[in-house]
Image (cartoon, rainbow, N blue to C red):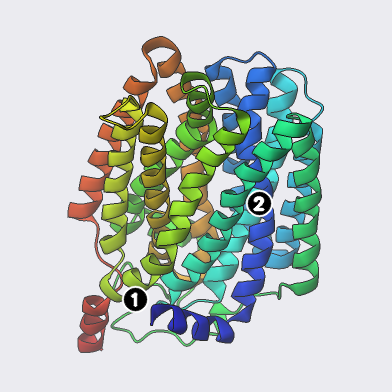
Amino acid sequence: MQSSRLIALLNQQRAVVYVGLATFLFTLAQGVSIFTYPLYGRELGLTLAQVGLTVSAFAVARVFTNVPSAMISNRVGRRWVLIAGGLFAAAGYVLSANADSLLPLMAFRFIAGIGSAAFITVGIVTTADLSTPANRARLMSVFQWSFILGITLGPFIGGLIAQFWGLRIPFYVIGVVSVTSAVWTLVMVPETRGLQSQAQPLPDAEAGQNPEAGVRSTPLSGFRQFSFMLSRGYVLVMLIFIGAFFIRGGGLFSLFPVVAKEDLGLSEAFVGVMQTLPAIASLLVLPFVGAISDRFGRKSIIVPGMMLYVVCLLILGYSTPVWILSAAVVFAIGIFIFGMAQGASGPVPIAYIADVSPTERQATAQGMARTVGDVALMSGGPVLGLISDNFGTSEALYGTAVVMAIFMLIFWFFARETAGRRVQQANQQAS
């Protein structure tokens, strides 16, 4: 039933499908790079902390690119920023194949990070342009599904390529794929800038009186344009972004592949399979999280998703044989749960950001949220790498689980609900 409704919705919003296909190609390349960079760094003789620094270089680029790329898209249009993102990423990947030490690898991954920030941020903004509060989480789920599908296939493809041709060749392959994403965007993706401004404003009961309403009819100037970022909802959902991005940068992008190869003794191909498991789990839950969120509220997905992060970190920190299960199987179970958490924490927090932000500030709101997340992504690699080098990977993962649990409880108790039947009924009564 839910799938048929989603298909009907996508028939009306074919532009979302086109954006999704461009996103799939872009993140297919990114998925290969997630697998390749840590192992390539270790082949160059880097420590775990230095491998984390290559992740930080990627994240630093995104920190300084998210908001500017969103603002540029308001001026020149969404399509051209998406195209530029694909081309920048391609250049960074191809150059990385020729790096022979830490600093060049960081510099070239920085270039790839610029492309990633431009494409992903503006891809989210484009999807928000095409959505309404009633279907926002479902359309964001389509974007996230495309994102995760690329991440799913990427490590597996990268593992096979590396197994037979070495760790340099995948960089050239994903350079070509990133260029293909840019070409698809040029040919097929329509321009969406200005679509939200053409939408009918909400009644006064829903806009203006509610500080977290999504539409504001009176233009603001100066600092007041960004004051919505100090609202309770926006601040609290930033905790979700920080937690999810931190463990992605410190775990999935740097620590998990090394643990699988060096501690569990898996080959490159099997490491690629292990990194594919989170994406498979995300793909399984994504068709449901958007519909559940639109119907029952954002917190009905965000809070359980954070709890799944806590559970998976505890399992991954343990990663020793349990009864008849080998350490590799325990690790696989933990990383599969990680993927479920990632699926829940992908589209719904983004939809929450759109819910609590003024319509004319959507690009800036999403760009700033990505920037906050990327600061956490930038910190995750070196922080968890440094803790692992000095105390062990288990201690690093257990500590992160405690922090994630605290963030979950704060959001659960203090964040306001912005969607679902109860909110819709309250808005109808108010109007």
Give neighbour class at mark 1: few <14, some 14-19, many 20+ (Cα, 10 Å). some
- Closer-to-camera residue (267/210): 267
Q: Secondary structure at mark 1?
A: loop
Residue 407's image quarter?
top left
- Residue 124 visible? The answer is yes
Of residues 220 and 154, the one drawn nearer to the viewer in this rendering: 154
In the displayed structure image, the side of residue 302 where residue 147 appears, left or right: right
Residue 120, horizontal then vertical, whole percent: 60, 55
Q: Earlier in the sequence, mark 1 or mark 2?
A: 2
The residue lying at 48 percent from left, 31 percent from top is 256
Q: Residue furthest top?
A: 390
Q: Which disc is residue 63 wearing?
A: none
Label 2, on which residue?
A: 28
Residue farthest along the left direction in this orientation: 413
Res. 31 in view? no
Q: Which residue is mark 1?
A: 208
Is residue 90 left or right of 252 when viewed as pictured?
A: right
Q: Which percent across, then down, holds residue 17?
A: 62, 73
**Which residue type carries mark 1?**
Gly
Residue at 47 percent across and 39 percent down: it is: 248
Label 2 residue SS: helix
| Quadrant in the picture for the N terminus | bottom left
The alpha-carbon separation of the residues under discs 1 and 2 comes to 42 Å
